[in-house]
Image (cartoon, helix red, strand yellow):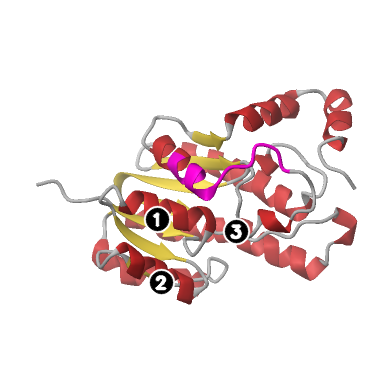
Amino acid sequence: MQRPETIWIIGASDGIGAALAREWSKRGVRLILSARRSEPLEELAASLGPDHIALPLDVSDRKSLDEAAQKISNHVPLDRVVHLAAMYDPGKVMDIDPESAAKLVTVNLTGTLNVAQVATPLLKEGGQLALCGSIAGYIGLPQGQIYSATKAAVINFTESLRVELANSRDVRLINPGFVDTRMTQRNDFDMPAMVTPEVAARAIVDGLHSNAFEIHFPRRLTYALKLLSILPYWAALPLTRRLTSG
């Protein structure tokens, strides 16, 4: 009898991560669920059944990740690791607090590095490491602030890692569009092609079971931004100014 997959989801306490956990649990997967907030994480794990583990951690704290990895060593090899944890602070570049910006870089970019370095050795040979960028990383967007810049860096980082680990691990890139979560509810501008966390979760699961390096959705938005990102600046920047108001 084939053993069920064991998947570690980081950033699972709510939003896309929680929906992804629910989607995979219906498919008979064993889950290790991590996030900073322990209470909703433990409630989620309990709701999914006894085979799933809640393991709180902070991706910006390397010691926290190392301790989690030590506990996970009893459940290795992992089949997949999906890293979704991120910090978001909308607003204009000139208004951002430098300390908040530094924290955002630490969580989104350094946190991704921490996860990649700690989680990869826990994966089986050929196992999958999925890191989360954003369509905000395709091009500098109004009110994208440091968040867009960190997600552009995560995209670049994941592309590099895909090449470096090509002979041993299956590195994937997840670039969501607007998803109805706590993060996007802070925005004060129109968000086109918004999807629910459940729709996002199904897109991610289907994408990770395909051969595609990048999982991006919804396509009607992502393809438009991909086109915008390859235009020359004289054409792209005036169009970009129209995307959000203020």
Q: Residue at x 68, y 59 (%)?
A: 88
Q: Amino acid at mark 2?
A: Glu
Q: Residue at x 30, y 50 (%)?
A: 26
Q: Amino acid at mark 1?
A: Ala
Q: Which residue was labeled with disc 3?
A: 86
- Residues under labels 3 and 1: Cα distance? 17 Å
Q: Is residue 101 above or below residue 64?
A: above
User: Is residue 208 highlighted in magenta?
Assistant: no
Q: Which residue was labeled with disc 1?
A: 21
* Residue 100 left/right relative to 129: right
Q: Residue at x 89, y 25 (%)?
A: 234
Which callout, 3 or 1, points at the residue further toward the start of the chain?
A: 1
User: Is residue 196 highlighted in magenta?
Assistant: yes
Query: x%, y% of residue 63?
Result: 48, 74
Q: Which residue was labeled with disc 2?
A: 43
For disc 3, the neighbor class at 10 Å (few under 14, some 14 to 19, many from 20) is many
Task: Determine whether the residue tagged by mark 3 lies in a helix, strand or loop.
Answer: loop
- Residues under labels 2 and 3: Cα distance? 21 Å
The span shown in magenta is 191-202
Pointer 3 and pointer 1: residues touching (CB < 8 Å)? no
